[in-house]
Amino acid sequence: MYIVMGRMVRGRTIVDAGQLRALVYAAAEPEDGLEHVYAETDLEGAGTVLFLCATSAERAEATAVRIVDRLLAQDELRGWEWEGRRGEA
């Protein structure tokens, strides 16, 4: 199991930690190997931790990117960004 941590910067919407965890689970696909999600929200956004079953750290990170891309496409997170990836297409 691998842990991928990241920070989400709040956009136009506000969600609490429980809502964010539910949205992450909804964005994950069975083949992603997502085992658990931890999220802690604050006024600026949220700290997140994804626990992933993967064969390497590199694969876990790539999977986390795919999950986050799908996550940020959801209307509930309109305008949110994954810190460090702003402005990327």
Image (spheres, rainbow, N blue to C red):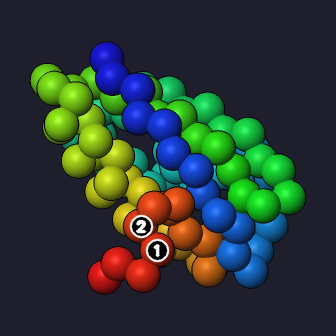
Most extreme residue toward the left, as rendered?
55
Name the residue type under label 2: Arg
Assess disc 2: are there few (<14), some (14-19) or many (≥20) residues with their C-alpha within 10 Å of its C-alpha: few
Residue 22 is situated, as x and y percent measured from the top left of the image, at 62, 47
Which part of the image, by quadrant, shows the C terminus? bottom left
Residue topped by disc 2: 85
Secondary element at image label 1: loop
Which residue matches tag 1?
86
Q: 60 above or below 87?
A: above
Q: Tag 2's secondary structure?
A: loop
Q: Residue furthest right?
A: 43
- Please give the name of the residue rendered at 76% of the width and 74% of the height, measured from the top-left corner: 13
- Where residue 43 appears, as percent x and y from the top left, is 85, 58
Q: CA distance from mark 2 to mark 1?
A: 4 Å
Vertical comparison of 56 with 78: above or below? above
Which sits in the foreground, 8 or 33?
8
Q: Amino acid at mark 1?
A: Arg
Q: Is residue 79 left or right of residue 13?
A: left
Residue under the image location 40 percent in, 26 percent down: 3
Residue 4 drawn at (x, y percent): 41, 35
In front: 54, or 42? 42
